[in-house]
C-alpha cells in the first residue's frame, strides 16, 4: 500500500478495506490509518467546500467506520488528524453555531435618486429635525462579499462568525485565524470587548488565479469572486482557507464594552488605528446632493477597483441618532443601500413553465438559453404573472433583454420584437393547475391565479413543507427540498408533525440512496434540536398567506401562546371580535386579518397545528424590556408631540414592550395626547382611559 498519495484521483479511489485487522501487521494498520485520514479529509473538503461530493454517503460512512474499527483495536495508532477526532463536529455541511451578541442586520435597498431623497426625508422626520439642523451621513462602497463578525477580547481575536440568519451564524474562527488580512491582535487601546463587523471578499485577480488552479487540479470552478470567498471561508479544513487570498473591509460594530466614537466617521478612523482595512472611497456628506455625487464617483471608479461592489451604503453619522432611529424588521432605519443598476444581457426564451407555490400561486417561469449576466449563468427568469406576460407581449422563441441585480431573481426587461420568429403564438395561461389538475382561479381584481386544491395539491404541499423546514422557519438542517420530496413521495411526511416522527423510520430511511449512518444521525439530531421552538418561528412556519416573519412576531407578541391564539380565533368564538382584535394590532390590515382568521378557522389547519404542537415545545416570545413601566400595556398616540415624531414615539414604546394601537378602546391603558388631540382624547375621557401629555409620558418611560 502506497504511503504517500500524490493525486486527488488516488484519494477519490480509496474504498474501505475489508481485510481482517487481526491478520494485519502494525505498520500496515498505520499505513491504512494514514490513508483513511487523507481520504476522509479529502471528501470532507469536497463535501463542505465545493458542495460537490464524489462518493456516496454510504461509501463515506464505510471509510469512517473502518477507521474507527482499526483505531479500536490499535489505540496507540490513533493519529492527531484522525477523522474520528472530527466526528464531534456536525458532518452535514454545517459549522457549529454562534449566537450573535447583537443581531447582524441587513440593509434596505434604494434604487433611484428619489428613493434616496425619501430616505433622508424619512430620517429627518423621524428625528423631528428642523431645516437648519445638520444631518451628516456617510457613503461607503457596498462590498460584494460576505459579512463577518469578529469578536476581540482584550484586543485579541477570540471568535469569528458568519452572518447566518442574523441572530445565529457559523463559527469560522479556525478558518479566519488563517486569513492574514484580519488582525489577530489589535493595535492601540481597544475596549475590553469589541465586535467588529465587515465584509470578507476576494479580489477579482485572485479569483481568476484560483479558478485557473482549480481547473488545472480538476476542482470545481467558482462562478464569481463572492462565491469563491464563500467557498474558501466555509472549509472544514482550515489549511485550505489559508491558501486562499481573502481580504476584509471593516465597516460596523457589534457588541462593544466602551464607547469608542460618537459618530460612524470617527468609528471608521478608530478601526484604522486598531489595524483594520477601511475602505478609502468612503465620504462624509451633508446633503442628498453630496450623497448622490459620492454615489456617482464610486460608480465611476467601480470598473477600476480590484474587487466587486454592488452599490453604495449610506449611514446616519451620529451614533445617538442611530440608536434613536433603531430598526424595522431586520434592517436599521439609519442606513440604506443604494444599489447600482442591474446588469443586462440578451437571450432567447425556449419555454414557459408554470410553478405552483406554497399558497397555490401559479407563477410563470421563462426557461432561457443560458447566458452569463454579471458573472453568473442565468437560465431562468421570473415572468411574475399572467398580466406581465401580456403587458410585455412575451412569447416562446422571443429574443429578450434580461437583467439581474444582486441576489434578485433575474427578470425580463423587454422583448426585442424585430427578432421575433414569424411562427410565434401568444402564450395561453393555464386555467387548471398543471400539477394536480384542479381549477386555478384568479379572483376579480387580483393579479395572481391560484390552484384551489390547497395542500391536497402535491405542489402546494411540497412547497409548504419546504417552507416549514426553511431557515427562518423550523430551520431543520439536512432536510432540504430533495429529502422532503423523497419523504413525501414515500408517504412518510404529509404534515409538519410527521417530521418529528421520522425517528421511528430510521431503518427505512437507511435503505434509501444517499442516506448513510452519519447523515441519518445528523438529520435526527437536527430534528431533535428543533423540537423546542420560538412562538414566532412556529407561526411563521405555518405558512399562512401574507404572514411573513415580521407579522409572525407581532402575532406571537400579541397572543403570547398557541392556546390563547387558538381560543381567540375558534369556530365557536365570536369571529367579529377576533377580527376586531386583529385589525387593532398595529400593522395588521383587514385583508391580512381575514387570511389569518380563515387559516385558524379551518378544522384541518387546527388539527394540523395541534398535532404539531404535541410534538414540539413552544417557547413564548422574548419581550423587549419586560420590566419597563409600560411593558404589556396598550398605548395610543394622538396629536403632535413637540420634538418627537410619531414614528419615534411608537418605536420607543414598542422597544419598551408596549403594544401600540391606532384607536382608543376599553383595552387602551394610556392615551398619549400631544397638541391638537381631537376625538381620541374625547373618547378616552368617556372610557375613563388615562390620558398623558408629552411630559407625563416621558416621565413614565424614563422611570
Ligand atoms: S453596513 C447594520 N456597510 O451588505 C448595517 N454593509 O445588503 C450592517 N455590505 O449584510 C451593514 N458593504 O454584508 C454595511 N459598507 C458596508 C457594506 C455592507 C457590504 C453588506 C453586508 C450586509 C449586506 C446588506
Image: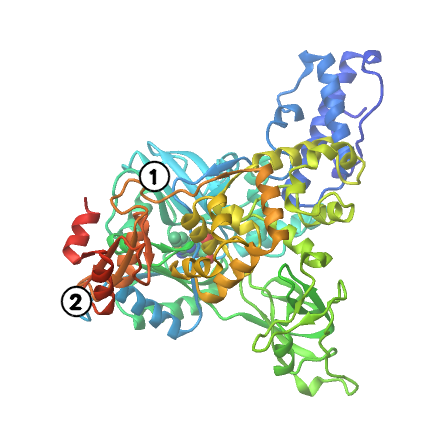
In the rendered image, is residue 11 in sight? no
The residue that label 2 is drawn on is: 675
Crowdedness near tag 2: few (<14), some (14–19) or many (≥20) residues, C-alpha within 10 Å: few
Q: Nearer the viewer, residue 16 or 605?
A: 605
- Give the total of numbered labels: 2
Residue 536: x %, y % from top left? 48, 47
Q: Is residue 447 left or right of residue 641?
A: right
Residue 663: x %, y % from top left? 32, 63
Q: Is residue 684 left or right of residue 194?
A: left
Q: Is residue 576 above or below residue 62?
A: below
Q: Residue furthest left?
A: 695
Q: Which mark is residue 4?
A: none
Q: Is residue 110 above or below residue 206?
A: below
Residue 517: x %, y % from top left? 73, 31
Question: Distance of mark 2 from mark 1, alpha carbons?
Answer: 43 Å
Q: Nearer the viewer, mark 2 or mark 1?
A: 2
Residue 144: x %, y % from top left? 49, 57
The quarter of the picture showing ligand 1: bottom left
Q: Are the two marked residues, 2 and 1, in contact with CB atoms closer than 8 angstroms?
A: no
Amino acid at each position: 500500500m502506497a504511503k504517500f498519495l500524490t493525486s486527488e484521483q488516488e484519494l477519490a479511489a480509496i474504498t474501505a478495506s475489508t481485510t481482517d485487522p487481526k491478520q494485519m501487521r502494525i505498520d500496515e494498520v498505520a499505513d491504512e490509518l494514514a490513508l483513511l485520514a487523507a481520504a476522509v479529509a479529502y471528501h470532507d473538503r469536497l463535501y463542505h467546500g465545493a458542495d460537490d461530493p464524489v462518493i456516496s454517503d454510504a461509501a463515506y460512512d464505510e471509510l469512517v467506520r473502518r477507521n474507527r474499527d482499526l483505531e479500536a483495536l490499535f489505540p496507540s495508532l490513533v493519529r492527531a488528524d484522525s477523522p474520528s477526532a472530527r466526528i464531534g463536529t456536525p458532518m452535514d455541511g454545517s459549522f457549529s453555531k454562534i449566537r450573535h451578541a447583537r443581531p447582524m442586520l441587513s440593509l434596505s435597498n434604494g434604487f433611484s435618486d428619489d428613493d434616496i431623497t425619501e430616505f433622508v426625508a424619512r430620517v429627518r422626520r423621524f428625528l423631528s429635525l428642523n431645516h437648519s439642523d445638520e444631518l451628516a451621513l456617510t457613503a461607503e462602497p457596498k462590498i460584494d462579499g460576505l459579512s463577518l463578525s469578529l469578536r476581540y477580547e482584550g484586543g485579541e481575536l477570540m471568535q469569528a462568525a458568519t452572518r447566518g440568519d442574523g441572530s445565529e451564524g457559523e463559527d469560522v474562527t479556525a478558518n479566519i485565524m488563517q486569513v492574514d488580512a484580519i488582525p489577530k491582535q489589535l493595535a492601540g487601546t481597544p475596549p475590553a470587548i469589541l465586535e467588529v463587523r465587515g465584509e470578507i471578499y476576494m479580489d477579482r485577480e485572485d479569483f481568476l488565479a484560483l479558478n485557473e488552479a482549480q481547473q488545472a487540479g480538476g476542482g470545481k470552478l467558482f462562478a464569481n469572486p463572492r462565491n469563491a470567498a464563500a467557498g474558501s471561508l466555509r472549509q472544514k479544513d482550515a489549511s485550505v482557507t489559508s491558501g486562499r487570498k481573502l481580504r476584509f473591509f471593516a465597516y460596523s460594530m457589534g457588541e462593544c464594552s466602551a464607547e469608542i466614537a460618537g459618530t460612524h466617521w470617527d468609528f471608521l478612523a478608530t478601526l484604522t488605528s486598531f489595524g483594520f482595512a477601511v475602505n478609502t472611497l468612503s465620504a462624509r456628506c451633508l446633503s442628498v446632493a453630496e450623497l448622490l455625487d459620492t454615489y456617482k464617483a464610486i460608480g465611476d471608479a467601480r470598473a477600476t477597483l480590484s474587487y466587486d461592489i454592488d452599490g453604495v451604503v449610506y449611514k446616519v453619522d451620529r451614533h445617538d441618532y442611530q440608536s434613536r432611529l433603531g430598526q424595522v424588521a431586520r434592517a436599521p432605519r439609519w442606513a440604506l443601500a443604494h444599489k447600482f443598476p442591474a446588469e443586462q444581457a440578451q437571450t432567447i426564451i425556449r419555454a414557459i413553465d408554470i410553478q405552483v407555490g406554497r399558497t397555490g400561486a401559479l407563477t410563470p417561469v421563462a426557461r432561457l438559453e443560458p447566458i452569463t449576466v454579471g458573472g453568473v449563468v442565468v437560465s431562468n427568469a421570473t415572468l411574475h404573472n399572467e398580466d406581465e406576460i401580456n403587458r410585455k407581449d412575451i412569447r416562446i422563441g422571443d429574443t429578450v433583454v434580461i437583467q439581474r441585480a444582486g441576489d434578485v431573481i433575474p427578470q425580463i426587461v423587454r422583448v426585442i420584437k424585430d427578432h421575433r420568429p414569424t411562427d410565434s403564438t401568444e402564450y395561453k395561461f393555464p386555467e387548471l393547475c398543471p400539477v394536480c389538475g384542479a381549477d386555478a382561479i384568479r379572483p376579480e381584481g387580483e393579479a395572481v391565479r391560484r390552484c384551489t386544491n390547497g395542500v391536497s395539491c402535491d405542489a402546494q404541499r411540497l412547497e409548504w413543507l419546504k417552507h416549514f423546514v426553511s431557515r427562518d422557519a423550523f430551520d431543520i438542517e439536512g432536510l432540504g427540498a430533495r429529502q422532503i420530496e423523497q419523504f413525501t413521495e414515500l408517504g412518510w411526511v404529509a404534515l409538519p408533525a410527521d417530521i418529528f416522527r421520522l425517528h421511528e423510520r430510521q431503518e427505512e430511511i437507511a435503505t434509501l440512496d444517499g442516506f448513510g449512518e452519519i447523515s441519518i444521525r445528523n438529520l435526527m439530531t437536527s430534528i431533535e434540536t428543533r423540537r423546542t421552538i420560538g412562538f414566532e418561528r412556529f407561526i411563521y412556519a405555518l405558512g399562512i398567506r401574507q404572514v411573513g416573519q415580521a407579522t409572525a412576531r407581532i402575532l406571537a407578541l400579541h397572543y403570547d401562546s398557541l392556546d390563547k391564539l387558538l381560543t381567540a380565533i375558534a369556530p365557536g368564538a365570536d369571529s367579529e371580535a377576533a377580527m376586531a382584535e386583529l385589525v387593532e394590532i398595529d400593522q395588521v390590515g383587514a385583508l391580512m386579518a381575514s387570511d389569518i382568521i380563515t387559516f385558524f378557522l379551518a378544522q384541518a389547519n387546527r388539527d394540523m397545528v395541534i398535532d404539531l404542537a404535541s410534538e414540539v415545545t413552544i417557547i413564548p416570545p422574548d419581550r423587549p424590556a419586560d420590566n419597563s413601566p409600560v411593558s404589556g400595556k396598550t398605548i395610543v398616540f394622538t396629536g403632535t408631540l413637540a420634538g418627537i415624531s410619531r414614528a419615534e414615539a411608537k418605536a420607543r414604546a414598542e422597544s419598551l414592550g408596549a403594544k401600540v394601537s391606532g384607536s382608543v378602546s376599553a383595552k387602551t391603558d394610556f392615551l398619549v395626547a400631544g397638541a391638537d388631540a381631537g376625538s381620541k382624547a374625547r373618547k378616552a375621557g368617556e372610557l375613563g382611559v388615562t390620558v398623558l401629555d408629552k411630559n407625563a409620558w416621558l416621565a413614565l418611560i424614563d422611570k
